[in-house]
Image (spheres, rainbow, N blue to C red):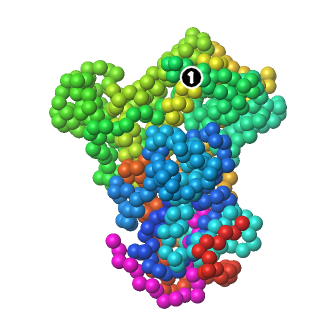
Amino acid sequence: MTPPAPAPAPSSVRPSVVIVGAGPRGTGLLERIAANAPGLYGDTPLDLHLVDPYPPGGGRIWRADQSPLLWMNSTAEDVTMFTDESVELDGPVRPGPSLAEWARAVRAGEITVEPGLADAIAELGPRDFAGRRLQSAYLNWVYERSVAALPPTVAVHEHRRTAVRVSGSRDGRQQVWLDGRPTPLLADLVVLALGHLEAELPAEQRELSEFAALHGLTHLPPAFTADSDLSALRPGEPVLVRGFGLAFIDLMVLLTEGRGGTYTAGADGRLTYRPSGREPVLHVGSRRGVPYHSKIGYEPAGERPPLPRFFGPEEVDALLARPGIDFRRDVRPLIDKELGFAHYHRLFTAHPGRTRMNWPDFEEKYAVADPAGAELQALVGAAVPDPADHLDLDALDHPLAGVRYPDGDALQEGLRGYIEADLARRHDPEHSPDLAVFLALLSVYGQLVRIGDRGPWWHGFFSYLASGPPGPRLRQLLALSRAGVVRFLGADTTVTADERRGVFRAESASVPGEFVEARALVEARLPGPTVEHTRDALLRALYADGAAATPAGLLAVAAADARILDRSGRPHPRRFALGPHTDARSGGAFARPRTNAPAFRQNDATARALLTFLRERAAVPAPVSAASVPRTAPTPEDSRVADQ
């Protein structure tokens, strides 16, 4: 632990940090500042400015004012905002409750929340999926707790505005300009903790939107589903949907239960959907043609795979030492080997009756085998007799590859069978190697944040296997399919604009020769994070001013502390960025407990970099350029000041 820093000589200018984005990522950074400040910064005054048009804690995505029908896709016990003994960090661990533990404390009267949440909290068990409103309350509580944990000399100022520009030289204070505020906030340091952002439409989307406008059709481009206006999707009319992930699940919920439909359960638990008559008919397809895999529905038990094994810090160090990294050539084989190791470790240790070799012998031979070579295939074939117990990542990634159906009705039956089998498997501990692969995916994600931009494949594959919907949502999807409210399009779905007929037309490789026409098209996915084409004015201005971007369009940051890099690779001494718009994207601002969450490691490193910079500069006031606007004096009598 670093000894408490002595207070430097008083300065007429209070040190200040502006954090743009007060959602879960900004809140997590604030928690780490509070944890590290006593040891690194002492009792020196500091102003923290949080800029976000949405309430702190939840921010835009996890705000309270969205439909109560929308859930999280993680169980309550698998959600935390706090560090634990698993997290590799230099700062102090400050344990705190998971969402499930927080709800238990609320029920016990130890934590007070608004009365409207009482029923939801009373019903929430550790393995249940909380509504997003409840998660918003938890995040707000974490924010309040983090503010309360700050030293008394630190003042927090909330600005419910949008930051539009950052200016200032590398060696001087920064100016953060806010929409509707005539003078900027002056800051020694600026952190962008932005979440998911809107983007300008790429060429294909622009063409589809223009076609829709010309022919009086509806085209909803990629967006956060809860913010989309779905009123143009008319009852009974066909709607084409591209995307079969979590955005589709939200769309499905809002257009069915959200329009008055209900479910009833039979004696066997099978759901039947009762339409309200206000639903459109959703024709959904994607590249894979299937929904994301269900969340695993059983508790982990027994020995866990010792991870990392084949893709850890040493392997990443070796990759980073190379002059150029090709993901498919250099990284993908290591990922495959790590996932395979976890799968077979669990199979051999938890289900030895399904193997023909002892684990030490298998592990020794596995360690020296090429992950894509014939030697490994021969080893697995000899040691694991049932092909169903083999891990085939390519087959997992392309479940309908080469599968053809005679007609659309056969496709519906086939896809329902696929979803039913997935639900059964993901809730059956006999398939616990799946859980081991899930844990390996988390471990791999934690290593990949050091490598930077991984291209589009990894994030999609990870989400498909590890971040799918709750099992109950897939049971609802099956009921909607049986009711004819949802129709499956199949794999490699394509959508074209039929100029002659003035409609959208969808077809897939799964049912050759068949197509579906509709007057509405929904792109069920988030916009791609790209600094060049984002609608966020601040990020676009940073990029125009020389901030570096990866080939995929992510903001380039230093792996060690998240400082923003320029196009020559130099880190900016006063500007930092965390979140999905950066090449250190970490999978989420909150995490499963005891998983050494990358976001928590990044938050700690950035918080310590901020405080160390301020401590070293506090004795001498930072220079203010001639263009700077004088800063309004802080209000020391208030610990928090809201700028509405």
Q: Amino acid at mark 1?
A: Ala
- From the viewer's side, name the closer residue of 439 and 78: 78
The chief SS type of the magenta part is loop
| Residue drawn at point x = 54 percent, y = 53 percent | 138
Image-quadrant location for residue 273: top right
For this view, does 456 lie left or right of residue 425? right
Task: Label 1: state its secondary structure.
Answer: strand
Question: Is the N terminus in the top left, top right, bottom left or bottom right quadrant?
Answer: bottom left
Q: Is residue 14 magenta?
A: yes
Q: Is residue 210 visible?
A: yes
According to the picture, the residue beneath numbered tag 1 turns out to be: 265
Q: Which residues are magenta?
A: 1-20
User: Where residue 64 sits: x, y (%)?
Assistant: 64, 50
Residue lying at the far front of the rendered structure: 109
Residue lying at the far bottom of the rendered structure: 9
Q: Is residue 19 magenta?
A: yes
| Local crowd size for mark 1, using a 10 Å CA cut-off: few (<14), some (14–19), many (≥20) | few
Question: Is the C terminus in the top left, top right, bottom left or bottom right quadrant?
Answer: bottom right
| Residue drawn at point x = 61 percent, y = 40 percent | 70
